[in-house]
Image (cartoon, rainbow, N blue to C red):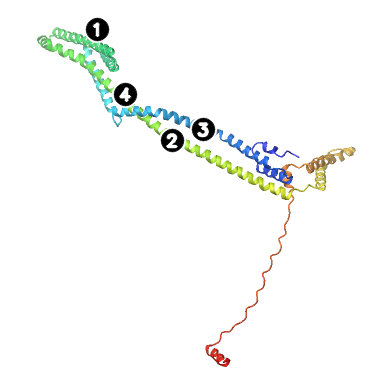
Amino acid sequence: MPGTTSNLHQGKLKPRRLEALAFYLGAHAIDPAPTLDEIEARFAQQVLEEKQEPLRALHALEAKLQQVRKERPESEALWTRIRKELGDTPPPYFQAVLMACCAFFALALDTLFLAPTMDILNIANPALQFLAAAGFAALCTIYFELTGLLYIGGKNSLPNRLIAIVVGTVGVVCLAAWGLLRGYQLRFAAVLAENPLGQFLAAHPVLASIFYIFITLATPIIGATALLLGWQEVSHARTWRRVRERFETLRTEEIQLARKIQAEQEVLDQFDKRKQAECLEWKAIFAQFYERGRRNGACKETRWSVLRKSLLGGLCATPLAFLIPLAWFPAQLAVPAVPAFALFIYLNHRRHHPSHDRYLTLENTHFAVIPDAPQPPELPAPKQRLLSKGNDSKGDTNDHD
């Protein structure tokens, strides 16, 4: 006979296998306590195996939530500071675009002013003069742009700011000299051409010098300032949006992760409850079939059934005998005899040593005959009583008196 608990070790529990095992134990009056303990241990093992993946997901969510809660205070503090500095509304990009247009216009104007003076550098072609003037204007604008960035970046460093001031002063002095040179060059060209402008510049040399120094310095400084302000506006707008997006993302993730963790915990709780209910169901099934086995037992298969099945198997193999020539008559007899004998050995062994499932199919059932229900007793027929009139009643009373 097979072992009493070996079937429980073959993968997951199956209803039919447990029912057959319980019936077998009950029919042989074997103590069911070890098997019930094994069922509980088996369910506990299945619970642990099936909870591994949900537990890993839950731990990953908890680690992510912890990281978000660690980053959120810093993000919230940064967002509070940005709101105090830049306001509650996002800085617009319109001002940055306007500053960029102003810087472009200053560069174009400086290019137009510088193009005629490129003769000093021996550039006579008008197209090359405009190209050289544009490059010179862009170079001066970038120079003052870098100076301004150096000054702003050295907010907490006095040496850096002093260096920026010195560099800016050198640029102003150089451009002032370049403005004077432009003025003298223009006056010289006007005198050669006998232009009235030459007489005007000769009569007012100081005023002409101040004007040319101004237009020489103003265009690159204004262009650099406009670019610097535009870049600051773009930087502020991007910083405001990036910090706010980071803060909102962390806050949303914290709420969503908390909900996901709660949902996963509820799933695990429901999983444990479901497995407990399933374990109770298995125990109830085991108890039911154990009692059936103890009360009914099983009947052994008859030998005549084994012989009948063996003969039927031999008859099924008989057509194969016609494939052998008639000269081999003993072989033809062996064709149905060998399968019949093999089936007899197998079925006879199964008759004496049935498996748990086979043992359950051989349950010794008892038929109960329900007696006929007793007929209800007949009730006596009621006597007929007639109602009399009132006068007759009085007459009867008088007669009686």
The CA span between labels 4 and 2 is: 31 Å
Pair 4/3: label in front: 3
Q: Secondary structure at mark 4?
A: helix
Name the residue tied to disc 3: 57
Instruction: Say which label, 2 or 3, has the lower sequence index.
Output: 3
Q: Can you name the residue that lies furthest to the left here? A: 203
Residue 356 position within the rendered picture, expressed as x and y whole percent measured from the top left: 72, 42
Placement of 370 over or under 104, stated as above or below: below
Assign the C terminus to one quadrant of the image. Answer: bottom right
Instruction: Say which label, 4 or 3, has the lower sequence index.
Output: 3
Residue occupying the point 32% across, 29% down: 80
The CA span between labels 3 and 1 is: 74 Å
The CA span between labels 4 and 1 is: 39 Å
Crowding at dot 3, Cα within 10 Å, few <14 / some 14-19 / many 20+, comes out as few
- 378 vs 399, nearest the viewer: 399
Q: Secondary structure at mark 3?
A: helix
Placement of 25 over or under 251, stated as above or below: below
Pair 2/1: label in front: 2
- 197 vs 366, nearest the viewer: 366
Name the residue tied to disc 2: 256
Placement of 301 over or under 71, stated as above or below: below
Three-letter amino acid code at disc 2?
A: Gln
Name the residue tied to disc 4: 235
Q: Can you name the residue that lies furthest to the front here? A: 401
Residue occupying the point 82% across, 48% down: 304
Residue 225 position within the rendered picture, expressed as x and y whole percent measured from the top left: 25, 19
Pair 4/2: label in front: 2
Name the residue tied to disc 1: 121
Three-letter amino acid code at disc 3?
A: Ala
User: Which image quarter: residue 377?
Assistant: bottom right
The CA span between labels 2 and 3 is: 15 Å
Pair 4/1: label in front: 4
